[in-house]
Image (cartoon, rainbow, N blue to C red):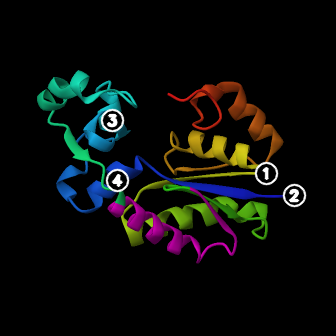
Amino acid sequence: MTALALIDGNSFYCSCERVFDAKLERRPVIVLSNNDGCAVARTSEAKALGIKMGQPMFQIRDLCRENKVAVFSSNYALYGDMSRRMNSVYEGFSPDIEIYSIDESFLDVEAIASGHRTEWASDLRATTRQWTGIPCSVGIGPTKTLAKLANKASKKLPGGVLDLSDPAEQTRVMADFPIGDVWGIGRAS
């Protein structure tokens, strides 16, 4: 059976900014699009304030000021460099890596025994955080779609890892998970 892991940098652009400024660790952070038009990345603290993905800056300017939200212009050179660093870490964990986007990569985990994949994913996650400073989540599944779903659901788990290789676990997670919440599968939010 095919087994894939999807590792994703959490609030990636914001996490990259936090790597270089420790004072941002628990502070709400957003990164704006080209020309600083709208929010394209938000930390959980910024999301809790009600800042939406794609929300225009002019609508949230006062909210950001009142709540001391750290606001950054996009720095694609930094994000690209951090992405390359993360993928270098992944090379030590899997011989087959498919870069899906700047902050997401699929790794072939078929050679890892199913009972050891969660431990492997936890180690991957911890090593990536230690070597790059970027917090990640890992989802495992027999297809890219299920790995993506597992990744999205793993963000709500304390360990940040979820394996959906077992059909019973797939059914359980899918029953309670709004598919529209999976970026790239459901509607964009």
Identify which residue is drawn at 60% across, 35% down: 182
Identify the magenta region.
77-100
Dots 1, 2 in contact, CB < 8 A = yes
**Rendered view: 95 above or below 16:** below
Secondary structure beneath dot 2 equals loop
Residue in the foreground of this view, choosing between 4 and 161: 4
> Picture coordinates of residue 41 (x, y %)?
37, 41
In the picture as drawn, the residue positioned furthest to the right comes out as 1
Q: Earlier in the sequence, mark 1 or mark 2?
A: 2
Q: Earlier in the sequence, mark 2 or mark 4?
A: 2
Residue 98 within the magenta-colored segment of the rendering: yes
Residue in the foreground of this view, choosing between 8 and 114: 8
Q: Which residue is mark 4?
A: 15
Residue in the foreground of this view, choosing between 6 and 31: 31
Q: Which residue is mark 2?
A: 1
**Disc 1 marks which amino acid?**
Pro
**Disc 3 marks which amino acid?**
Ala
Residue 81 within the magenta-colored segment of the rendering: yes
Secondary structure beneath dot 3 equals strand
Q: Which residue is mark 1?
A: 142
**Disc 4 marks which amino acid?**
Ser
**Disc 2 marks which amino acid?**
Met
